[in-house]
Amino acid sequence: MWEWLTLPIDHSRTHDVGLAVSWHGRAMVIAWGVLAPLAVIVARFFKILPGQNWPKKRDSKFWWRFHWMGQLVVFLLAIIGLFLVLANGAAPVNDHSLIGYAVIFGLIVQVTFGLFRGSKGGPTESSKDGSLRGYHYDMTPRRRAFEALHKSTGYGVIVLAVVAILLGLWSANAPVWMWLALGVWWFVLILVFLKMQSRGMAVDTYQAIWGVDPSHPGNTMPHPGWWVRRSSNDPKGDKIVRRN
């Protein structure tokens, strides 16, 4: 069994890559195959933590810190992985490299979006003049554009990264166990995603931070996301009043 697992996926070719290329692959798989999807899942489904007394206790920073720290590691690993393959000589122009460059470009776009997302505002982070004004709290057009673009680009980049990983595995003629390990891992992530989505754990970011009071301007506007749970100002509990 172990001997079969260590065989290359294509028996007609050898699995023989250099040190730089092998570490390029490891860096990219850890970044895009493991950390990036985890950071997205945490950001989508853990804005309200299990056991958190929401809406009395709001604005948990766990999801935010995990997301940005995780994606920072993704960024660093991606740059290291890119350097390794470029330093090893001119990378061949093929589907893997072209999609890989598209992923790097998407990553840079995502970082740029994050840097220009605007201020937060609201009761917990008022502006310099002491008011509650903020791009996020007011859900300005700039903030709404950021949320729509950041989320859609993020999912798109991860899909491209998965394709690039699969093409890279094939190009390197990776052993069977690598294909199986990644396949099982991604299958588990998809199941977890679907389960959490079905349980209504994808909560509106705005309400997770500021609650359901209609006096908060964002609670009177449509949410720019998709299939996100929003709640009414209902003392009886958490009532789903709208799905996007």
Image (tube, helix red, strand yellow):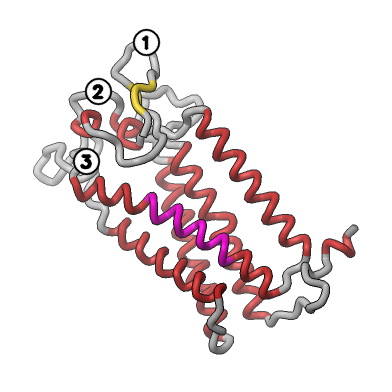
Task: Using the image as rendered, state which of residue 38 and residue 170 is in the foreground.
Answer: 170
Q: Give residue 58's quadrant in the image.
A: top left
Residue 162 in magenta stretch? yes
Rendered image quadrant of residue 1 = bottom right
Give the residue number, with chain letter if any, for mark 3: 139
Of helix, strand and loop, which one carries label 2?
loop
Residue at image x 21%, y 29%?
220
Which label belongs to residue 17?
none
Label 3 CA crowd tier, 10 Å (few <14, some 14–19, many 20+): many
Q: Name the residue nearer the viewer: 54 or 94.
A: 94
Q: Foreground residue, 71 or 32?
A: 32
Q: Secondary structure at mark 1?
A: loop
Please give the name of the residue rendered at 69% of the width and 75% of the height, measured from the top-left corner: 172
Residue at left offset 83%, top offset 68%: 7
Q: Height in image: 197 above or below 143? A: above
Residue 236 disc label: 1
CA gap between label 2 and label 3 equals 15 Å
